[in-house]
Image (cartoon, coloured by chain):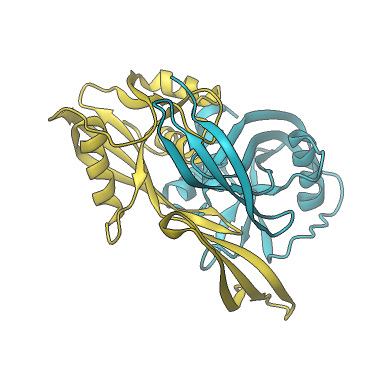
Chain colours: A cyan, B yellow
Amino acid sequence: MKPWKTLARETILDQGKYLVVENHTIELPDGRILPNWAWLITPAYINAMVLTDDDHFLCFRQTKYGIAGTSLAPLGGYLEPGEEPLACAQRELLEEMGCVADEWIKLGTYCVDGNRGAGTAHLFFARGARRVQAPDADDLEEQELVRLTRVQVSNALARGDFRVLAWAAVAALTLACVNP
Amino acid sequence: MKPWKTLARETILDQGKYLVVENHTIELPDGRILPNWAWLITPAYINAMVLTDDDHFLCFRQTKYGIAGTSLAPLGGYLEPGEEPLACAQRELLEEMGCVADEWIKLGTYCVDGNRGAGTAHLFFARGARRVQAPDADDLEEQELVRLTRVQVSNALARGDFRVLAWAAVAALTLACVNP
C-alpha cells in the first residue's frame, strides 16, 4: 500500500503555539490530486493512568471547555518545547499530583485525527506512585483529585465517564493491556 | 465546579464541511477573561469494533494521511448531515464490510480535543456480524480487510498497532468493557 504524497503546504491560519492550520495539496497513489486538504498543527500531549503503591488509580474530577458538566480525567498535559514525552509525564505527575512513580509503561503514540493531524497523544501507565510533595497544578480548570479502584475505573469507563477521547483511550488501554 | 462561559465567538477560517475555526472569548469562573481561544469545528464520526458470528474481529489494514506506513483500523466514517450515530455505524458496516450485526453496544460519545473541540467520536461494539453483500467502500485510502482473534487484537493494541487515537480507544474499550 502506498502513502498519500504531500505536494505542497501553505499556512492559512497561525494562532501561535496552540494552533496552526495548513492547506495541503495531496497526490493519491492512483494519481488523483486533492487540492484543499486542511491540516491541523497543535501541540503534542501526554495522558497517563496512575496507580498508587496501595493499588488505587489517581484521577481528577474536573471541568473542561469542550464538554458540559464534569468528567473523570487522567493525568495530562502538553509537552514543553523539546521535552520528551516520558519526561513530560513525570513532570506532570509531580506538578499535578505531587507524586513520583516506580515504573512507567508506554501505551503508545497516537495521531489524534488520522485525516487532519491535530497533534499527537503519548499515553502511559505509571505504577507504584507515591506522594512526595504537595501538588502545585497550574491548570486553568477547577479539579478534584479522586482515588478509584480498578472496578470503579472499569465501571466509569463503561458509563462513558471519561468524556474526552484521549482520557477514555488511556484508561481503557490500561485496563485492556496491563495486569496491575 | 463551574463551567467556562463563552462570551463571544467569531469564525476566523471557513474551509467548508470539514473544518471551521472559531475564535472564542471565554470567562473563567474566577472572572478572568481568555480573549483568543481557538475552537475547531469538524464533523462527528463513528468508529466500531465488529465481531463476527464466528468470533473474529473485522478490521482493516490501511494507510491514513496522518500516519506513516500502515495501521490496523476499526470500521469508521463521518456522520452524514442529520444522521444518527448508530444509523451511521450500521450504514458504514454494510458499505465497508458488507455486513449486518445482531447487536450494537454503545461505548460512549467523546469530545476529540477537550480544549479545542475538533469533533465528536461515537464509539460502538457490534456483535454477531455476518456478510450479506459485497463491500462497496468509497474511501480514498487503500485498505485490506483482516480477521483477528481477541488475543490478536489485544496484542496489536499493546504494540500500538492501532495508530489513530479513536481506533485505539474503540478497540481498548471493547476489550476492557465487553465480555464477547
Foreground residue among A101 and A110: A110
Along the viewing direction, whichever of B72 and A18 lies nearer the viewer: A18
Q: Position of residue A73 (x, y in %)?
A: 60, 52
Quarter holding the C terminus of chain A is top right
Vertical comparison of B17 with B52: above or below: below
Q: Residue at x 54, y 36 (%)?
A: B66
* Image side of residue B21 versus residue A85, left or right: left
Q: Is residue B16 left or right of residue B100?
A: right
| Residue at horizontal 81 percent and vertical 46 percent from the top | A94
Res A50 quadrant in image: top right
Q: Position of residue A3 (x, y in %)?
A: 49, 25
Which of the 4 image quadrants contains residue B180? top left
Picture quarter containing residue B136? Answer: top left
Q: Depth check: A56 or A4 in front?
A: A4
Residue farthest to the right, as pictured? A133
User: Residue A64: in sight, yes or no?
Assistant: no
x, y (%) of residue B81? 30, 59
